[in-house]
């Protein structure tokens, strides 16, 4: 998924949609406008996540690989009503 174009048009909510997907997946980080200004220049969500984790949440690299997180986030964005991960187990 190329996040450059959806950030400007197409993906409803852009950065906000990503932040909501992160939260839904149990990832307690949010990309503010300044962070997004750097990340949106990268070609893929995986590259964005890799850069973000290395610079702001390096401890998460011991648990998650950026490619895996990108797949989860992309799936969440593609199916906003679906339940994933721990949220699927906690909601009726």
Image (cartoon, rainbow, N blue to C red):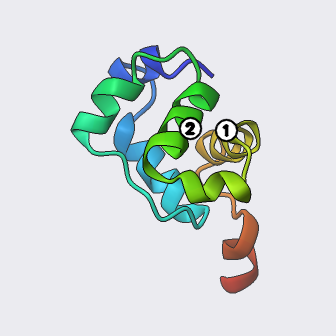
Say whether residue 92 is visible.
no
Say whether residue 46 is visible.
yes
Q: Quadrant of residue 4?
A: top left
Residue in the image at 73% along x and 59% along y: 63
Give percent across and percent down for residue 35.
Answer: 31, 37
Quarter of the picture holding the C terminus: bottom right
Secondary structure at badge 1 equals: helix
- Locate residue 68 relative to residue 24 in the image: left or right: right
Give percent across and percent down for residue 69.
Answer: 68, 46
For disc 1, the marked residue is 70
* Mark 1 crowd level (few <14, some 14–19, many ≥20, 10 Å Cα): some
Residue in the image at 58% along x and 51% along y: 80
When the figure is inspected, residue 7 is found, relative to residue 32, above or below; the finding is: above
Nearest the eye: 57 or 30 = 57
* Mark 2 crowd level (few <14, some 14–19, many ≥20, 10 Å Cα): many
Residue in the image at 59% along x and 42% along y: 77
When the figure is inspected, residue 25 is found, relative to residue 21, above or below; the finding is: below
Quarter of the picture holding the N terminus: top right
Q: Residue 49 carries which label?
A: 2
Give percent across and percent down for residue 89.
Answer: 75, 81
Residue in the image at 41% along x and 27% along y: 39
- Locate residue 13 relative to residue 34 in the image: left or right: right
When the figure is inspected, residue 60 is found, relative to residue 5, above or below; the finding is: below
Nearer-N-terminus badge (2/1): 2
Q: Quadrant of residue 70?
A: top right
């Amino acid at each position: 998924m190329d996040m450059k174009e959806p950030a400007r048009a197409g993906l409803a909510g852009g950065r906000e949609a990503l932040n909501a997907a992160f939260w839904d997946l149990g990832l307690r980080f949010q990309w503010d406008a300044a962070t997004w200004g750097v990340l949106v220049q990268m070609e893929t969500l995986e590259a964005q996540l890799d850069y973000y984790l290395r610079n702001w949440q390096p401890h998460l690299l011991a648990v998650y690989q950026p490619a895996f997180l990108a797949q989860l986030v992309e799936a969440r964005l593609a199916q906003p009503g679906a339940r994933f991960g721990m949220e699927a187990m906690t909601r009726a």
